[in-house]
Amino acid sequence: MARKLTRRDFLRIGVVGASATVLAGCKFPRRWEVLEPYVTPPEEQLSGQPTWYASTCRQCPAGCGIIVRVMNGRALKLEGNPEHPLNKGKLCARGQAGLQVLYNPDRLEGPVRQSKRGSRDFQRVTWEAGLNTLAEKLGAAGGSVAVWLGSTTSGHLYDLFQRFLSAVGAPAPLVFDLYTAFHGYSVLQQVDQQLFSQAQLPSYDLGNADVVFSFGADLFGTWLSSVRYGYEFGQFRSQELGKRGLLVALEPRTSLTAAKADKWVPLKPGSEALVAGAIASLIASRGFGPAERVDRAKALAKPVDVNAVAAAADVPADELVRLAQIFAQAERPVAIPGSQLTGQPSAAEASAAVQVLNMIAGNFGQPGGVSFTPAPPAANLVKPPVSTVSDVNDLISRMAAGQVQLLIIHGANPVYELPQKDAFMAALGKVPFVVSFAPIVDETAAFSDLILPDRTYLESWGYEVVSPAFGTPIVGSQQPVVMPVYDLRAAGDVLLTVAKAIPAAAQALHWDDEVEFLKEMIAQLPAGAAGGSGSSVLWSRFLQHGGWWPAQVPSQPSQPAATLPAISAPAPQYQGEESQYPFFLHPYMSMFLSDGRGANQPWLQGAPDTNTSISWQTWVEINPVTAQKLGLKIGDIVQITSPYGSMEAGVYVYPGIRPDTVAIPLGQGHTDYGRYARNRGVNVLRLLNPQQGAEGHLDWSTVRVKVEPTGRRMAMATFEWTEGVMEGFPNKSIPGY
Amino acid sequence: MLKLLPRSGLWRWVLGVAVIALVIIAAYFIFTSRTEAQSTQQPIAFNHQVMVGMGIGCLYCHSDARRSPTAGMPSVQLCMGCHKVIDPQNPEIVKLAAYWQKGEPIPWQRVNILPRFVYFSHEVHVSVAGINCEQCHGDVAHMTVDKQVVRMNMGWCLSCHEKQPNAAQLTDCVVCHQ
């Protein structure tokens, strides 16, 4: 060019060029839409107007009430049911993600069979063929049939299966999944039966307490009823006269609960019961608090060498004294034994040691204390009991001995969830026929012969006796909010259909369909808060309001007196020699993926973890000082080895954990279960002891591991990069360092 | 600026053509933005004149106009209610029956479309204001093929809203642009 290009010219050319490019890139507007009417319209729907249906969430065993916004046959949004006495209109992330359970692209569209287990070469069969096969196998098996249910299987399905199995002379259904096993539901029930003659899960009235000691209970994450505890926490923090309550979290890692606590006591894993015992003993020996409390402490607590406990728990002795003082002198203290305790050997004793503190406080049935909820006024409506690990091992032995001809699985995934999965898989080989009701091919369904996919919970009928229910007996209702997405039969209807072909069961299961059974069961209940009279009105109100609960909160049943022999806290026992395995392993349930069932919902996968902001991955949390010593940075891949297995994960340098502990979240490491779950992360259960169940509960919280760098790195999908988080530590100019 | 123009005549031609093309494209966008469908090729040659001639009112099929923001389209079941027996040999009715047999909805091409930033409620206009369907949708009774008769833009809506007793309320932006 003869003339030099100036900046002004450049801008002019640039603007003209850019706008030409933009316009050229635009497509012609396509102003058309297709209006698709209904083929057969439902009666109560208006186009363009949503309808709200009440139902029960099934993403965890808590049983929160939900309302679902449905527009023209599509479920659009889940919210908590404001009328439901348990969750009072609140709903957690897992509840919200229920839409992705309903509209999951990996759902099976109909029954499938595979000729070789594990081949995953499923062929579609008709419902007729599937039902006939099941009927045939059931008839041939007689009493040698085993049913394995999950904790989120609807109460009515448990009741139907239980009646069926009883009629054919088979053992009652097993109710076992990782969620309830990890949080020690069976242990909690056992302890409550032992101490208070109430074999049910306790409710802790956090909202009215003034001092709460949580021993490893992730109240706001996944523990028992996290939505309700979140609500309670709001009440706890907004008490009269500006009081905020004092929450102390005693656990080795800063969980979500510890992050919201006023004090985090990072005690050694396994020493929680010792600390509780020391607190009880100190109340007695130092005479903290009102006289009745001191007297009860003297009766219940064994004298303890506080300095020995301080050393064993790695909590300074004066801290223990202060904790004892705070607890005893509070007006409404409550102590909560959490899953850290129920995952140890001697879990029952460990949990009892913490309940002793509640006995000392005298808070049973009192505001701010422990309570048990009366059962609903209907003899047949009972919460199904959760099975123990011993029960699981019994079943595995029976399977291995060839005593089970047919295994039916609904709502559980043992091949993924059991630390003793190898034993289960071996025993499975001796079971001639396995039927799964899973809506998606999960790890267990991949080793089944026939899958009769059940409808997902938003398309299903059911009821749920809620536990823990925080003082108000609740029977939650469940109804389909949309037409089933695929041509699928409800598991209850499948059972009722095939039962007709089995003479022994046909009498016991005489209902034509599951709704008839549901109506009969619910008809036992008197009019509740929703009022009305006549069975059809009561049934409608049951569905419309999301369940049954009484108009008045019943008075608390009287609590047994604490006349028990002194309970001593068991000393911790660890698995693995310290010299070889220097670190404690702390597996935990992420509030999104929970026990792994959330891994196929991308909203849950994509939600950043509450404490590390990592999504879609498995990671290992390591204390910064430890990381520095080992020369590890965030993103380094390390191999973690326990006495039982080994795995690799990316490092996340996390200040909120003991230097001698590493934490790994559960939930990833699926080999099946859909495109979002498959081949992602690692299943930390492989590090646990496959010899489970010596004491009946899941043993997970006292395993030791070693951590070895591999030299490789990975990109961590996190919002917070913790490299350099401990720069400047220790600050030698501060006295003490 | 003029110094920037290319020296050679050919390049001036090319630039000129490009500019004119841009202007034409821009004009096309401006003058053809409509609130109606580009095409009115319907899957079934539905003829309103016949229906209305039989004495069937608008609300028989578009029944949600009374109580919902959207007027609604008649379900296939509703059509078949009559057309199971009325004129089944007509090739268009045969098409309808085919949709019913297959359990598929009829993919009607929408005629009246408002942009998504506008909130319009049929219920308010039909039930509360008591406006006749023909006032906005024209003489549908004599249409053989559906068309939008008036450009449903804001000015047209306002021309009626302004004449109402509660014009101050109805001409508030927020009423339609929620």
Image (spheres, grey):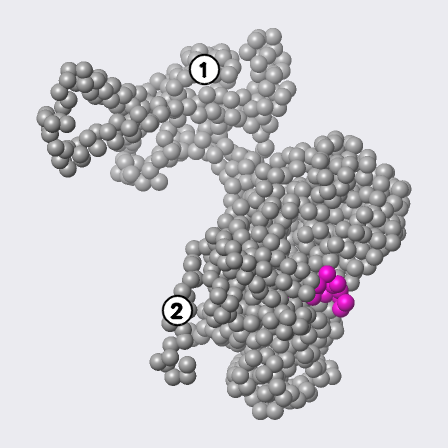
Q: Nearer the viewer, residue A462 or A697?
A: A697
Label 2 CA crowd tier, 10 Å (few <14, some 14–19, many 20+) = few
Residue B41, numbered label: 1
Q: Amino acid at mark 1?
A: Gln
How far, Cα to Cα, is label 2 from label 1? Answer: 70 Å
Q: Residue at x 56, y 69 (%)?
A: A661
Please state the chain letter of the residue tagged with numbered disc 2 in the rendered image. Answer: A
Magenta segment: does it hold A695?
yes
Indicate yes or no whether the magenta region holds residue A723.
no
Along the line of sight, which residue is nearer the eye, A172 or B161? A172
Image position of A192 (left or right of B79): right
Of residue B97 and residue B125, the one placed in the foreground of this image is B97
In terms of secondary structure, where does tag 2 sit? loop
Residue shown at the point (82%, 59%) measured from the top left? A394
x and y percent of residue A391 in the render?
79, 60
**Residue A185, quarter of the rendered image:** bottom right
Whether residue A519 can be seen here: no
Q: Quadrant of residue A115?
A: top right
Residue A327 is situated, as x and y percent measured from the top left of the image, at: 55, 81
What residue sits 81% from the left and 56% below the top? A395
Residue A154: x and y in percent read 69, 50
For mark 1, give the secondary structure.
loop
Looking at the picture, does residue A704 appear above or below residue A29?
A: below
Q: State the quadrant of the C terminus of chain B.
A: top left
Residue extending furthest toward the bottom: A286
Magenta portion: prevailing SS class: loop
Identified by mark 2, the residue type is: Glu
The residue drawn where x is 53% and y is 52% is: A617
Residue identifier under label 2: A727
Q: Please report the bounds of the magenta region as a residue range.
A: A689-702
| Above or below for A550 versus A542 | below
